[in-house]
């Protein structure tokens, strides 16, 4: 999928955002990174460890209601083995969000105790929220702060300035714009980010992207995906490749243009939209065990 691999991902405002994050670190006590539970590693910024250095870090696996529950549990175990506190949340429904402040209290317990010894009865701690575009930072802040001041929009790159939010009597959050990184180590990461909408569709080959997603879905084969597109093993085996399958799905949905030809572009948009909205079922595209295999390559 060379078309994805060769795209330039790092616009100027992202360089500026990275500098803002670095400059704001001295203002906070911890960093909370929001990742997409369907692609936890691919939606993690590999530059983050170097940027935040010794600051305590927690991970929020957002959109867990769209991810496979078993896989999400595996990811939480993976983080815990690496001494990182992790929590699965769904910002739109509010699932798991109430566990965020208790987790911060555990992570920052030593600092809180030290501040109380100095006579600070109810010390206020500050946490920076970071994450790639479209991963759900604004939705999380809206939910946790019970406000609607953070703009929520289902497209990358909406949040542009740093804002503070009070989430309890002891914690404040610093919002930061979403930022990607200069280059991807492997093509799989680029594809996964494109599947979930972290990268603008305007710069993508939509048909190619949908075909690659179909290849993955056929391998995973969740029941809901099969039922939604009225597919079965016989039909899958009759499709020579993912382009054939794209045409089969387009035909089943009645996406025809003049002459009875399948509108594959429209079918591609539909497939991506339904995956991104969770209509194809709870699907996780990468697991910790698959991550180890990728690292060995």
Image (cartoon, rainbow, N blue to C red):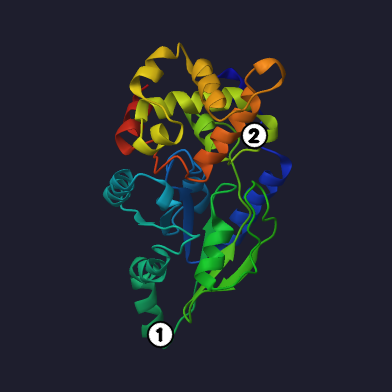
Residue occupied by mark 2: 9
Q: How crowded is the residue under tag 2: few (<14 C-alpha within 10 Å), some, or many (20+)?
A: some
Depth order, front residue of 49/155: 155
Label 2 vs 1, first from the N-terminus: 2
Question: Is 229 placed above or below 155 here?
Answer: above
Residue occupied by mark 1: 118
The residue depicted at 52 percent of the width and 42 percent of the height is 276
Is residue 26 rendered to the left or right of residue 99?
A: right
The residue depicted at 49 percent of the width and 32 percent of the height is 189
Distance between the Cα atoms at labels 2 and 1? 47 Å
- For residue 198, say whether it is visible: yes
- For residue 186, say whether it is visible: no
Residue lying furthest top: 240
The residue depicted at 63 percent of the width and 64 percent of the height is 150
Looking at the image, how many numbered discs can be counted on the residues?
Answer: 2
SS for callout 2: loop
* x and y percentages locating residue 24 in the rendered image: 60, 61
Which quadrant would the C terminus be assigned to in this image? Answer: top left
Depth order, front residue of 277/247: 247
Q: Nearer the viewer, mark 2 or mark 1?
A: 2
Give the quarter of the image for residue 291: top left
Is residue 117 rendered to the left or right of residue 179?
A: left
Which quadrant would the N terminus be assigned to in this image? Answer: top right
Q: How crowded is the residue under tag 1: few (<14 C-alpha within 10 Å), some, or many (20+)?
A: few
SS for callout 1: loop
The residue depicted at 56 percent of the width and 23 percent of the height is 251
Give the quarter of the image for residue 217: top left
């Amino acid at each position: 999928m060379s078309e994805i691999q060769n795209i330039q991902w790092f616009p100027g405002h992202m360089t500026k955002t990275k500098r803002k994050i670095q400059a704001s670190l001295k203002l906070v006590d911890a960093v909370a990174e929001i990742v997409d539970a369907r692609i936890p590693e691919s939606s993690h910024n590999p530059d983050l460890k170097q940027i935040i250095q010794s600051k305590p870090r927690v991970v929020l696996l957002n959109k867990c209601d769209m991810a496979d529950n078993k896989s999400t549990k595996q990811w939480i175990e993976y983080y815990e083995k690496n001494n990182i506190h992790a929590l699965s949340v769904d910002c739109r429904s509010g699932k798991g969000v109430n566990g965020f402040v208790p987790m911060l209290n555990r992570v920052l317990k030593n600092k809180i105790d030290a501040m109380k010894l100095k006579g600070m009865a109810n010390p206020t701690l500050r946490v920076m929220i970071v994450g790639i575009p479209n991963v759900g930072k604004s939705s999380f802040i809206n939910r946790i702060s019970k406000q609607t001041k953070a703009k929520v929009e289902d497209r990358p790159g909406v949040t542009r300035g740093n804002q503070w939010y009070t989430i309890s009597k002891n914690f404040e959050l610093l919002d930061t714009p979403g930022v990607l990184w200069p280059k991807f180590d492997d093509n799989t990461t680029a594809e996964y980010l494109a599947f979930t909408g972290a990268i603008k569709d305007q710069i993508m080959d939509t048909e190619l992207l949908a075909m690659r997603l179909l290849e993955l879905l056929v391998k995973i084969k969740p029941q809901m995906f099969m039922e939604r597109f009225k597919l079965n093993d016989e039909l899958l085996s009759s499709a020579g490749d993912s382009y054939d399958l794209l045409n089969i799905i387009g035909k089943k949905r009645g996406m025809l243009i003049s002459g009875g030809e399948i509108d594959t572009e429209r079918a591609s948009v539909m497939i991506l939209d339904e995956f991104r909205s969770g209509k194809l079922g709870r699907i996780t595209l990468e697991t910790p065990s698959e991550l180890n295999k990728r690292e060995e390559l």
